[in-house]
Amino acid sequence: MKLYYAPDTCSLSPHIVLRELAIEFELVKVDNRSKLTADGRDFLTINPKGYVAALERDDGNILTEGPAILQYLADLKPERGLAPRADSWERVRLQEWLNFITSEIHAGSAPLFNRVLPEEVKSIFREKLFRRFSFLEETLSTRAYLTGSTFSVADAYLFTVLGWCKFFSIELSPWPALLEYRDKINARPAVQAALRAEAAQ
Ligand SMILES: N[C@@H](CCC(=O)N[C@@H](CS)C(=O)NCC(=O)O)C(=O)O
């Protein structure tokens, strides 16, 4: 299995999950500007959409879109409990979280990376993001992880996108439960190993 990734991006979440599940994999770095892989291939031939993450199975099949990759990986080792069973109501709840993270937090943060967007426009997106953080704060004040008492793939994803706050000079201190949650996930050995591996390449 190969994971195509770029440092400081959403591909950190499947990277964390691969390590949480102790699945053997190869990391292939992608230059998001040149669209070249570290081994010199045109990334557009791997994912024509031109973005990470992309997961290549040993049979050559390539899967893209973070929420799909995360669920595919979790289902490879259901006994590790990173996603509820595929035919359960709890799984629907997980999908609800993954969709919230991808559309509201991940996509909601994207305008803040934009170098040409005026500050007044960015502040509209920042305020919207803060409303989502307040919703997360309420949830995480009553439970340890998004889906309940155990870590799931949704937590790997939320941790990843919360990590972008440092690029926007957003402090999480107004949302103490969210801050504590981020620090708790940051301390997981698989998370530390993924961060170290990305920094080393
Ligand atoms: N819908 C995709 C979005 C992936 C995405 O936004 N990837 C970003 C990094 S976080 C990227 O590689 N952007 C480069 C580009 O679009 O050129 C998913 O959820 O996986």
Image (spheres, rainbow, N blue to C red):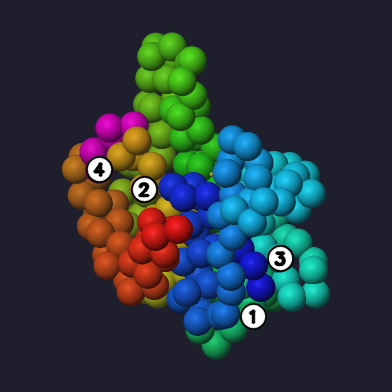
Q: Which mark is residue 56?
A: 3
Instruction: Tell me the CA gap for discs 4 and 1.
Output: 34 Å
**Magenta segment boundaries in residue numbering:** 168-172
Residue type of the residue flagged with mark 1: Leu
Residue 80 vs residue 42: left or right?
left
Magenta stretch secondary structure, dominant:
loop
* Nearest-to-viewer mark from 4 and 1: 1
Q: Which residue is mark 2?
A: 163
Q: Residue at x 59, y 53 (%)?
A: 38
Closest to the camera, between mark 4 and mark 2, is 2
Give the residue at x 46% y 50%: 7
**Mark 3, secondary structure of its residue:** strand
Q: Are marks 2 and 1 in contact (CB under 8 Å)?
A: no
Residue ID for mark 1: 76
Query: In x, y percent, where is residue 109?
Result: 46, 35
Label 1's element? helix
- Answer few, some or many: residues within 10 Å of disc 3's Cα (few below 14, many 20 plus, some between 14 and 19): some
Please tell me whether mark 3 or mark 2 is closer to you in this view. Answer: 3
Tag 3–tag 1 contact (CB < 8 Å): no
Residue kind at label 2, given as amino acid type: Gly
Query: Would you name the residue on which mark 4 appears?
Result: 172
